[in-house]
Amino acid sequence: MAKCELAKADYGIDAPLVVQKHNLLGAISLLAGLGIHRLLVPVLPVAGKVMWMVAFLFAFCFFVSALLLLWSSKFGKLRQRERLIDALELVGNEKVLDVGCGRGLLLNGVARRLSRGRAFGVDLWQSIDQSGNSPEAALANAKAENVADRVEVKTADMRDLPYSDEYMDAVVSSIAIHNVPDEAGRARAIKEIARVLKPGGRIAIQDLRATDEYVKILKDLAWREVKLSRLNFLIFPPVRMVTGRKP
Protein backbone atom coordinates (compact mmCIF):
# COMPACT_ATOMS: atom_id res chain seq x y z
CA MET A 1 0.00 0.00 0.00
CA ALA A 2 1.52 3.32 -1.07
CA LYS A 3 1.54 5.65 1.92
CA CYS A 4 1.76 8.76 -0.23
CA GLU A 5 -1.46 7.85 -2.04
CA LEU A 6 -3.31 7.07 1.18
CA ALA A 7 -2.19 10.41 2.58
CA LYS A 8 -3.94 12.21 -0.29
CA ALA A 9 -7.19 10.25 0.02
CA ASP A 10 -9.69 11.35 2.67
CA TYR A 11 -12.09 8.69 3.88
CA GLY A 12 -13.92 10.89 6.36
CA ILE A 13 -15.20 10.31 9.87
CA ASP A 14 -17.62 7.46 10.45
CA ALA A 15 -20.80 8.30 12.42
CA PRO A 16 -19.77 11.98 12.81
CA LEU A 17 -22.90 12.87 14.79
CA VAL A 18 -22.09 10.14 17.31
CA VAL A 19 -18.57 11.56 17.73
CA GLN A 20 -20.00 15.05 18.28
CA LYS A 21 -22.62 13.74 20.70
CA HIS A 22 -20.07 11.85 22.79
CA ASN A 23 -17.77 14.88 22.95
CA LEU A 24 -20.69 17.07 24.01
CA LEU A 25 -21.85 14.61 26.68
CA GLY A 26 -18.26 14.30 27.89
CA ALA A 27 -17.99 18.08 28.25
CA ILE A 28 -21.35 18.28 30.07
CA SER A 29 -20.30 15.49 32.45
CA LEU A 30 -16.96 17.18 33.09
CA LEU A 31 -18.59 20.53 33.87
CA ALA A 32 -21.14 18.80 36.10
CA GLY A 33 -18.33 17.10 37.98
CA LEU A 34 -16.51 20.37 38.52
CA GLY A 35 -19.70 22.00 39.74
CA ILE A 36 -20.41 19.16 42.15
CA HIS A 37 -16.85 19.25 43.46
CA ARG A 38 -17.04 22.97 44.12
CA LEU A 39 -20.59 23.34 45.43
CA LEU A 40 -21.76 20.02 46.82
CA VAL A 41 -18.68 18.34 48.29
CA PRO A 42 -18.19 21.06 50.98
CA VAL A 43 -21.83 20.57 52.09
CA LEU A 44 -22.24 16.79 51.68
CA PRO A 45 -18.70 15.34 51.64
CA VAL A 46 -19.52 11.64 51.15
CA ALA A 47 -22.45 11.95 48.74
CA GLY A 48 -20.75 14.84 46.94
CA LYS A 49 -17.55 12.85 46.36
CA VAL A 50 -19.52 9.87 45.03
CA MET A 51 -21.46 12.09 42.60
CA TRP A 52 -18.27 13.91 41.59
CA MET A 53 -16.50 10.61 40.82
CA VAL A 54 -19.49 9.31 38.83
CA ALA A 55 -19.63 12.50 36.76
CA PHE A 56 -15.93 12.30 35.95
CA LEU A 57 -16.25 8.60 35.10
CA PHE A 58 -19.00 9.41 32.60
CA ALA A 59 -16.87 12.21 31.12
CA PHE A 60 -13.91 9.85 30.75
CA CYS A 61 -16.02 7.17 29.04
CA PHE A 62 -17.61 9.61 26.59
CA PHE A 63 -14.26 11.19 25.63
CA VAL A 64 -12.55 7.81 25.21
CA SER A 65 -15.42 6.56 23.05
CA ALA A 66 -15.13 9.63 20.80
CA LEU A 67 -11.35 9.16 20.52
CA LEU A 68 -11.77 5.47 19.62
CA LEU A 69 -14.29 6.37 16.92
CA LEU A 70 -11.86 8.92 15.47
CA TRP A 71 -8.95 6.46 15.62
CA SER A 72 -11.05 3.83 13.89
CA SER A 73 -12.02 6.29 11.13
CA LYS A 74 -8.50 7.55 10.49
CA PHE A 75 -6.35 4.46 11.11
CA GLY A 76 -8.17 1.28 12.07
CA LYS A 77 -10.41 0.98 9.03
CA LEU A 78 -7.45 1.61 6.69
CA ARG A 79 -5.68 -1.41 8.15
CA GLN A 80 -8.78 -3.58 8.24
CA ARG A 81 -9.73 -2.95 4.63
CA GLU A 82 -6.82 -5.05 3.35
CA ARG A 83 -7.84 -8.00 5.53
CA LEU A 84 -11.39 -7.78 4.27
CA ILE A 85 -10.34 -7.60 0.63
CA ASP A 86 -7.92 -10.51 1.15
CA ALA A 87 -10.93 -12.72 1.90
CA LEU A 88 -12.17 -12.27 -1.69
CA GLU A 89 -9.07 -14.03 -3.08
CA LEU A 90 -8.95 -11.77 -6.13
CA VAL A 91 -6.74 -12.58 -9.10
CA GLY A 92 -7.06 -9.21 -10.87
CA ASN A 93 -9.60 -9.58 -13.66
CA GLU A 94 -12.85 -9.56 -11.66
CA LYS A 95 -15.85 -7.28 -11.50
CA VAL A 96 -16.27 -6.45 -7.80
CA LEU A 97 -19.14 -4.60 -6.12
CA ASP A 98 -18.81 -2.55 -2.92
CA VAL A 99 -22.23 -2.28 -1.26
CA GLY A 100 -22.49 0.96 0.71
CA CYS A 101 -19.19 2.25 -0.65
CA GLY A 102 -19.30 5.70 1.00
CA ARG A 103 -16.18 7.70 0.21
CA GLY A 104 -14.60 4.67 -1.46
CA LEU A 105 -12.33 3.06 1.13
CA LEU A 106 -13.03 -0.52 0.06
CA LEU A 107 -13.99 0.41 -3.48
CA ASN A 108 -10.58 1.91 -4.18
CA GLY A 109 -8.76 -0.74 -2.18
CA VAL A 110 -10.34 -3.36 -4.41
CA ALA A 111 -9.55 -1.38 -7.56
CA ARG A 112 -5.86 -1.32 -6.61
CA ARG A 113 -5.85 -5.11 -6.96
CA LEU A 114 -7.70 -5.24 -10.28
CA SER A 115 -5.15 -4.89 -13.05
CA ARG A 116 -7.70 -6.02 -15.63
CA GLY A 117 -10.97 -5.81 -13.70
CA ARG A 118 -13.34 -3.11 -12.48
CA ALA A 119 -14.72 -1.99 -9.12
CA PHE A 120 -18.33 -0.83 -8.76
CA GLY A 121 -19.77 1.06 -5.79
CA VAL A 122 -23.33 1.83 -4.74
CA ASP A 123 -24.57 4.03 -1.91
CA LEU A 124 -27.33 6.42 -0.88
CA TRP A 125 -24.66 8.88 0.34
CA GLN A 126 -26.05 9.75 3.77
CA SER A 127 -23.80 12.16 5.69
CA ILE A 128 -25.13 10.82 8.99
CA ASP A 129 -23.20 7.61 8.28
CA GLN A 130 -19.98 9.28 7.12
CA SER A 131 -18.82 12.88 6.97
CA GLY A 132 -18.76 14.40 3.48
CA ASN A 133 -20.37 11.29 2.01
CA SER A 134 -20.91 11.74 -1.74
CA PRO A 135 -20.13 10.12 -5.10
CA GLU A 136 -17.81 13.04 -5.86
CA ALA A 137 -15.78 12.28 -2.72
CA ALA A 138 -15.51 8.60 -3.69
CA LEU A 139 -14.28 9.49 -7.17
CA ALA A 140 -11.86 12.10 -5.81
CA ASN A 141 -10.36 9.44 -3.55
CA ALA A 142 -10.17 7.05 -6.50
CA LYS A 143 -8.15 9.67 -8.35
CA ALA A 144 -5.91 10.15 -5.29
CA GLU A 145 -5.25 6.40 -5.20
CA ASN A 146 -4.63 6.31 -8.99
CA VAL A 147 -7.52 3.92 -9.71
CA ALA A 148 -10.11 6.27 -11.22
CA ASP A 149 -9.98 4.41 -14.55
CA ARG A 150 -11.13 1.21 -12.85
CA VAL A 151 -13.91 2.63 -10.64
CA GLU A 152 -17.61 3.30 -11.21
CA VAL A 153 -20.17 4.55 -8.67
CA LYS A 154 -23.96 4.70 -8.69
CA THR A 155 -26.63 6.06 -6.38
CA ALA A 156 -28.70 3.00 -5.52
CA ASP A 157 -30.44 1.18 -2.69
CA MET A 158 -28.74 -2.08 -1.68
CA ARG A 159 -32.18 -3.68 -1.54
CA ASP A 160 -32.59 -3.11 -5.29
CA LEU A 161 -29.17 -3.28 -6.92
CA PRO A 162 -28.95 -1.86 -10.48
CA TYR A 163 -27.11 -4.85 -11.95
CA SER A 164 -28.24 -7.93 -13.84
CA ASP A 165 -28.23 -11.46 -12.44
CA GLU A 166 -24.79 -13.05 -12.02
CA TYR A 167 -22.95 -9.91 -13.15
CA MET A 168 -20.35 -9.63 -10.36
CA ASP A 169 -17.45 -11.91 -9.51
CA ALA A 170 -17.25 -10.76 -5.87
CA VAL A 171 -19.01 -8.45 -3.41
CA VAL A 172 -17.61 -6.60 -0.42
CA SER A 173 -19.30 -4.41 2.19
CA SER A 174 -18.20 -2.67 5.37
CA ILE A 175 -20.43 -1.35 8.16
CA ALA A 176 -23.28 -0.60 5.77
CA ILE A 177 -26.00 -3.27 5.71
CA HIS A 178 -26.93 -2.77 9.38
CA ASN A 179 -28.13 0.73 8.43
CA VAL A 180 -31.19 -0.88 6.82
CA PRO A 181 -33.60 -0.47 9.75
CA ASP A 182 -35.60 -3.70 9.54
CA GLU A 183 -34.62 -7.37 9.39
CA ALA A 184 -36.69 -7.98 6.25
CA GLY A 185 -34.86 -5.15 4.48
CA ARG A 186 -31.45 -6.51 5.49
CA ALA A 187 -32.49 -9.95 4.24
CA ARG A 188 -33.50 -8.37 0.94
CA ALA A 189 -30.08 -6.72 0.66
CA ILE A 190 -28.27 -10.02 1.24
CA LYS A 191 -30.47 -11.75 -1.34
CA GLU A 192 -29.76 -8.97 -3.83
CA ILE A 193 -26.04 -9.49 -3.27
CA ALA A 194 -26.55 -13.20 -3.93
CA ARG A 195 -28.53 -12.44 -7.08
CA VAL A 196 -25.89 -10.28 -8.75
CA LEU A 197 -23.04 -12.68 -7.95
CA LYS A 198 -21.86 -15.27 -10.43
CA PRO A 199 -21.82 -18.93 -9.36
CA GLY A 200 -18.64 -19.47 -7.36
CA GLY A 201 -18.44 -15.77 -6.49
CA ARG A 202 -17.24 -14.74 -3.05
CA ILE A 203 -18.50 -12.23 -0.52
CA ALA A 204 -16.78 -10.52 2.41
CA ILE A 205 -19.04 -8.45 4.66
CA GLN A 206 -18.07 -6.83 7.94
CA ASP A 207 -20.58 -5.16 10.20
CA LEU A 208 -21.25 -3.97 13.74
CA ARG A 209 -24.36 -6.09 14.22
CA ALA A 210 -26.83 -8.38 12.42
CA THR A 211 -24.00 -10.60 11.14
CA ASP A 212 -25.82 -13.66 12.52
CA GLU A 213 -28.71 -12.76 10.23
CA TYR A 214 -26.43 -12.63 7.21
CA VAL A 215 -24.96 -16.04 8.02
CA LYS A 216 -28.41 -17.61 8.38
CA ILE A 217 -29.63 -16.21 5.06
CA LEU A 218 -26.56 -17.44 3.19
CA LYS A 219 -26.87 -20.89 4.71
CA ASP A 220 -30.57 -20.97 3.80
CA LEU A 221 -29.48 -20.21 0.23
CA ALA A 222 -27.14 -23.23 0.42
CA TRP A 223 -23.99 -21.16 0.10
CA ARG A 224 -20.64 -22.84 0.69
CA GLU A 225 -17.85 -22.00 3.11
CA VAL A 226 -20.03 -19.60 5.11
CA LYS A 227 -18.04 -18.36 8.10
CA LEU A 228 -18.42 -15.77 10.84
CA SER A 229 -15.23 -14.36 12.33
CA ARG A 230 -14.48 -13.38 15.89
CA LEU A 231 -14.78 -9.76 16.93
CA ASN A 232 -12.19 -7.54 15.28
CA PHE A 233 -11.04 -4.58 17.39
CA LEU A 234 -9.22 -2.63 14.66
CA ILE A 235 -12.57 -0.91 14.13
CA PHE A 236 -14.65 0.68 16.90
CA PRO A 237 -17.22 -0.48 17.76
CA PRO A 238 -15.77 -3.94 16.99
CA VAL A 239 -16.94 -5.78 13.87
CA ARG A 240 -17.36 -9.35 12.68
CA MET A 241 -16.68 -10.58 9.15
CA VAL A 242 -19.00 -12.85 7.17
CA THR A 243 -17.49 -14.71 4.23
CA GLY A 244 -18.89 -17.29 1.83
CA ARG A 245 -19.04 -18.61 -1.72
CA LYS A 246 -22.10 -18.82 -3.97
CA PRO A 247 -22.76 -22.39 -5.17
Image: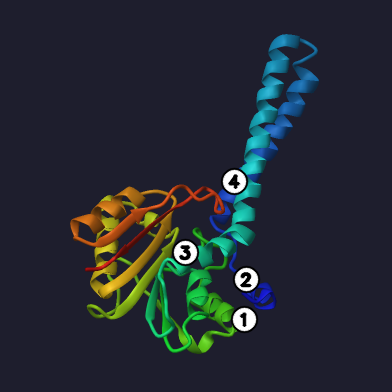
Nearest-to-viewer mark from 4 and 3: 3
Classify residue 58 as left or right of residue 95.
right
Q: What element carries label 2?
A: loop
- Residue bearing the label numbered 3: 84
Q: Earlier in the sequence, mark 1 or mark 4?
A: 4
- Residue bearing the label numbered 4: 21
Q: Which of marks 4 and 3 is nearer the N terminus?
A: 4
Disc 4 from disc 2: Cα separation: 22 Å
Of residues 104 and 134, which is closer to you in this image? 104
**Dividing the picture into quarters, in which one does residue 131 lie?**
bottom right
Which amino acid does the dot numbered 1 rest on?
A: Ala
Q: Which residue is drawn at 53% across and 55% down?
A: 15
Measured along the vertical axis of the image, is residue 62 above or below residue 82? Answer: above
Q: Earlier in the sequence, mark 4 or mark 2?
A: 2
- Residue bearing the label numbered 2: 10
Disc 3 from disc 2: Cα separation: 19 Å
Classify residue 167 as left or right of residue 115.
left
Q: Residue at x 60, y 51 (%)?
A: 69
